[in-house]
Amino acid sequence: MTANKADSAALKHIFTILTFAAAGMAALLALLPAGGHDQLWFLLMARRWLGGAQIYGPIIFDSNPPGILWLSALPIFLGRLLHLPTTFAAKLLVSLTEAASAWLSYRFLRHAWRPLVTYERWALLFSFIVLFAVVPARDFGQRDQMLAFLVLPYVLAAAVDPREHRLTSLRCAAGVMAAIGICLKPHHALLVIAVELSLLFLPSATTFPHRLRRLFRPEPLLIALLGGMFLAAVHRLTPLYFTFALPVLHDTYWAIGHLSLGGLALEAIELCVLAAGTILLYTITKPRSPLVRLLLIAGAASSLAYFLQGTGWYYQQIPAINLFGAALALQMLDLAQRKAQHKEGTVPRWATSAVAGLCLLALALTTHFTGYPFTADRAFAIESPDPAFFKDLPPGTPVATLTTSVDEAMMPIERYHLTWAQRTNNLWLLPAILRNETPGAGKPPSRILPPEHLANLEALQHRFMVEDLNRWHPQLVLVERCQKANIHCQVLEDRDDDLLAWFLRDPAFAAIWQNYTYQGSRGAFDAYTLISSATNK
């Protein structure tokens, strides 16, 4: 056996071990725990919608387009059909779709790149599992995580010669998957625009008319067609999104996506380092295949989408991290091939055993720090509010929470099988209102609302809460003490706002609140219960 063949065999064993270890870590970090708060909220909205509630109406109100809500109905149907927990059904569907994306991506890669030896196929499978399952961790099933693997086949297909007619059906599948991903996160339409413009204008061996014909591939045509159909469906089926939700979003979301360019970069250090390193390596190695260049362009477009959203939340970085990571993996394999061709270095005999030992250690540490085996309390990571608020409540008890945080509600509702007694998952209208009402109480607002807009938003937030309390009659209402200097409420960290006092300004709310009595405080929250409920106890 030659040295290169020996190295290939050793690398195959190493990447096989790494692949199974990565799959184990993905199960521990992403598959076995409960879904994240956003995923649970989307499932809750889908249940209400399937029960007859109007989207953007008095029972469901959200800032997102309805695509994710419609999609979230699928695991509910599957769970009912197979008698599975909804969160398990949701992760099962995401996993199956991700596997389909991996297979489709590999088919395009074979035509867009170069022939692969066995260890390279294992290395790419390892990279895919790490990037699209381990890196997202508890963000598995987030819209951004799904978009990342849904658009990957499209990017790879863009690097394939369009005259490969054998791939037409696969190209159609890639276009449909990418369209679904873009409809989930419309910001990432930038990715498709960037890829298509690069195919049209960047230097290549083909003439401009030939490059122009590339725009009529099945993938971009299907993305445009299905995107138009999605907009038409939203207009027809949920007209309130355009007439009600979008105007409210326009007036309020700036207070949530409020970080400066520097602040967003600081929140995305890992993305910035990965992007810089991958682009630098590209300029040094200059790969002959256009595939890596397209992945870099797609990653840059997804990075721009992250910055445009302005929140700095990690999961919004995932598409860019995944695309840059895929480009880096391909470049590293190219470097390994070049060294093999020049017979530079050999794989030490002890390397396979060392990798196996390190993988076992990593799995053991991951198992330990994730608290396996996953009991219900461990699977639902509830740090705040204190679980003691909920553990003695009967299933189905309606509960409300006055907070601007998106993290504080869905976990306890799902864990203890309670009823969420609000139409929104947090008071996301309130930060814009408070910053305009008292601009001197914190950092100056980045947008000054006209007085009539501010008055309408104030009335709307008060009306929402009064109607929610009257509809669900929550037995327990938690109020985050944002007025305390040591409690930093999400997106209001620079301020000390008394949320309850703000709501009590409304006579209708104050009249309802007379039926609630203070029960005590834990952590950042005060607890109030219905007087009748407290008396019965």
Image (tube, grey):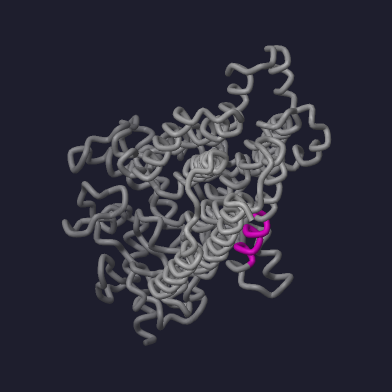
Q: Residue furthest front?
A: 1
Residue 423 visible to the viewer = no
Placement of the C terminus among the 4 image quadrants? bottom left
Residue 455, position in %: x, y? 35, 39
413 w.r.t. 264: above or below:
below
- Does residue 277 belong to the magenta stretch? no
Q: Nearer the viewer, residue 298 or 476?
A: 298
**Magenta highlight: main SS:** helix
Q: Nearer the viewer, residue 160 or 439?
A: 160
Residue at (80% x, 36% y) in the render: 168
Q: Residue furthest right?
A: 166
Quadrant location, the N terminus: bottom right
| Residue 513, quarter of the rendered image | bottom left
Seen as rendered, the residue at the extreme top is 208
The span shown in magenta is 89-98
In the image: residue 273, left or right of residue 435: right
- Residue at 57 percent across and 52 percent down: it is 3
Q: Nearer the viewer, residue 54 or 23?
A: 23
Q: Residue at image x 64%, y 64%?
A: 92
Tally of marks: 0
Q: Which quadrant holds residue 303? A: top left
The quarter of the picture where residue 112 lies is top right
Please tell me whether residue 92 belongs to the stretch shown in magenta.
yes
Looking at the picture, does residue 493 appear above or below residue 384?
A: above
Horizontal arrangement in the rendering, residue 519 relative to residue 22 (left or right): left
| Residue 519 percent across, percent down from the top left | 28, 76
Q: Is residue 300 visible?
A: yes
Q: Relative to the observer, which residue lies in front, 137 or 278?
A: 278
Position of residue 25 measured from the top left corner of the image (x, y, whole percent): 50, 65
Taking the view exactly as shown, the residue that stands out farthest to the bottom is 537
